[in-house]
Each structure stands twice: as C-alpha cells, then as structure tokens.
Image: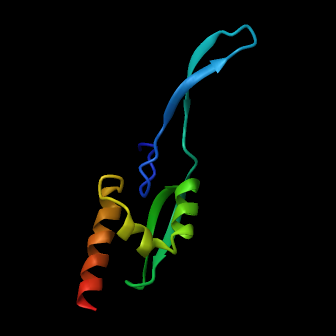
Amino acid sequence: MSRICELTGKGRQTGHNVSHANNKTKRVFLPNLQNVTLISEKLDRSFKFRVSTHGLRSVEHNGGLDNWLMKTSDEKLSTNAVKVKRELKKALTAA
C-alpha cells in the first residue's frame, strides 16, 4: 500500500543521512499516516481514511470533513475521498 495521505496527497520525500564526516547516503522521509474514521455532518455517516497527522489537523482547522472536501481540488484527493465529495455535493444540491 502506498504511503500517501488520502486527503492532502502528502507522500514520501527523499533526502540524505549526513554523517559527521559529511558522507551522504540516501534515505526516505515517510509521512505519519493514521487510520482514522471521520464523520460527515451533512451525510450523517462516518468514513474511514488513511490520513497524515498534518492532514487531520488541517481538516479540524477547516471545520470538519465536509468543509475540507468542498475546498480541496479533486487532484489531491484519493478515489475514495472523491466519491465521498460527489455524494456530499449531491446531498447539498438536494437540500
């Protein structure tokens, strides 16, 4: 399974381990991904996502999952999150 946040698109980064002698060896920085259940207030349902802790703080800062999905472009979101966004748009237009 790829190490990519489903809501922010944050993935792995590469860099170097640098020794005291200034030797550089390749390394990978992985995002801190957590399995989280987020609740949609408009749909009155919960959804499971694999989200980075940075993404989780961003969702809470924007006022919850519904606001976050409406503000974020589809390119950053995973296919699962895009389906939830479509469902949310349908519910908002019907109401």
Question: Quick check: 29 left or right of 7?
Answer: right
**Picture quadrant of residue 66:** bottom left
Quadrant occupied by the C terminus:
bottom left
Quadrant occupied by the N terminus:
top left
Image coordinates for residue 39, horizontal then vertical, percent: 48, 77
Image coordinates for residue 82, horizontal then vertical, percent: 30, 63
Vertical placement of residue 83 versus 11, above or below:
below
Vertical placement of residue 93 versus 76, above or below:
below
**Picture quadrant of residue 93:** bottom left
Vertical placement of residue 45 versus 12, above or below:
below
What's the residue at 73%, 7% (across, down)?
21
**Picture quadrant of residue 81:** bottom left
Vertical placement of residue 31 versus 35, above or below:
above
What's the residue at 64%, 20% (across, down)?
17
What's the residue at 36%, 70% (across, down)?
70
Q: How is the image coloured?
A: rainbow
Q: Nearer the viewer, residue 81 or 93?
A: 93
> Exactly how many numbered labels are in the figure?
0
Image coordinates for residue 34, horizontal then vertical, percent: 55, 56
Q: Nearer the viewer, residue 16 or 32?
A: 16
**Residue at the bottom extreme of this rendering:** 95
Question: Quick check: 46 left or right of 88?
Answer: right
Question: Quick check: 22 left or right of 15?
Answer: right
Image coordinates for residue 54, horizontal then vertical, percent: 57, 54
